[in-house]
Image (cartoon, rainbow, N blue to C red):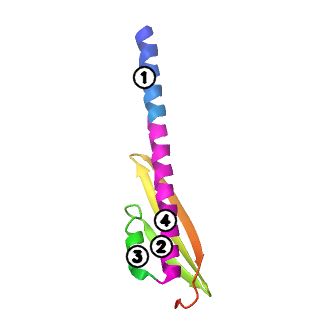
């Protein structure tokens, strides 16, 4: 009887640990998407395409970086689909917008 309860308890703890690890992993990826979007938007607003390309390289693996320019603003959206084994897919995305600096061609 005790061994059955112990086995169920161990399995429950393993499941809780797996869900916790997945949640933390998704939070980290979401943060990287936001950081990448902000960095790319900032560099494009400054007109520094080389640094914007470097910032794009920091995007999570498999992420898409979409840039749209509207008037005097540049908007960057970073999206990625993540999964952990059979858990997922989970779609994560972040966007950032910046005003294009005077004298910079859109």
Of the 4 image quadrants, the one containing the N terminus is top left
Q: Quadrant of residue 99?
A: bottom right
The reply, left or right, for residue 98 in relation to residue 14 is right
Q: Residue 38 placed where, x, y %?
A: 52, 68
Per the image, is 40 magenta?
Answer: yes
Distance CA(mark 4)–CA(mark 2): 14 Å
Image depth: mark 3 or mark 2 in front: 3
Residue at which label 1 appears: 10
Query: If you read the primary sequence from the N terminus, does the residue marked by circle 2 or circle 1 appear first?
Result: 1
Earlier sequence position, callout 4 versus callout 2: 2
Q: Is residue 26 above or below residue 69?
A: above
Q: Which residue is found at the position 38% from the left and 79% from the top? A: 50
Real-space Cα separation, disc 4 to disc 1, in angstroms = 36 Å
Give the label, 4 or 3, closer to the camera.
3
Rendered residue at 57%/69% (across/down): 96
Determine whether label 2 and label 1 are within 8 Å by CB. no
Disc 3 designates what residue?
Answer: 51
Marks 1/3: CA distance? 49 Å
Q: Looking at the image, do the residues carrying marks 1 and 3 touch, with CB atoms under 8 Å apart?
A: no
Give percent across and percent down for residue 98. 59, 76
Callout 2 secondary element: helix
- Residue at label 4? 79
Q: Which of marks 4 and 1 is nearer the N terminus?
A: 1
Q: Distance between the residues labelled 2 and 1?
A: 45 Å
**Was residue 42 drawn as part of the magenta stretch in this picture?**
yes
The residue segment tinted magenta is: 18-47
Q: Write the residue at 51% across / 50% down.
A: 27
Discs 1/3, front: 3
Mark 2, residue position: 40
The residues bearing labels 3 and 2 have C-alpha atoms spaced at a distance of 8 Å
């Amino acid at each position: 009887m005790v061994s059955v309860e112990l086995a169920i308890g161990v399995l429950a703890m393993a499941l809780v640990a797996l869900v916790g690890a997945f949640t933390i992993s998704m939070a980290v990826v979401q943060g990287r998407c936001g950081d990448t979007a902000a960095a790319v938007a900032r560099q494009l607003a400054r007109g520094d395409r080389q640094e914007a390309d470097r910032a794009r390289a920091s995007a999570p693996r498999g992420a898409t970086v979409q840039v749209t320019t509207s008037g005097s603003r540049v908007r960057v959206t970073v999206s990625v689909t993540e999964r952990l084994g059979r858990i997922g897919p989970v779609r994560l995305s972040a966007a950032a917008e910046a005003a294009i600096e005077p004298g910079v061609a859109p």
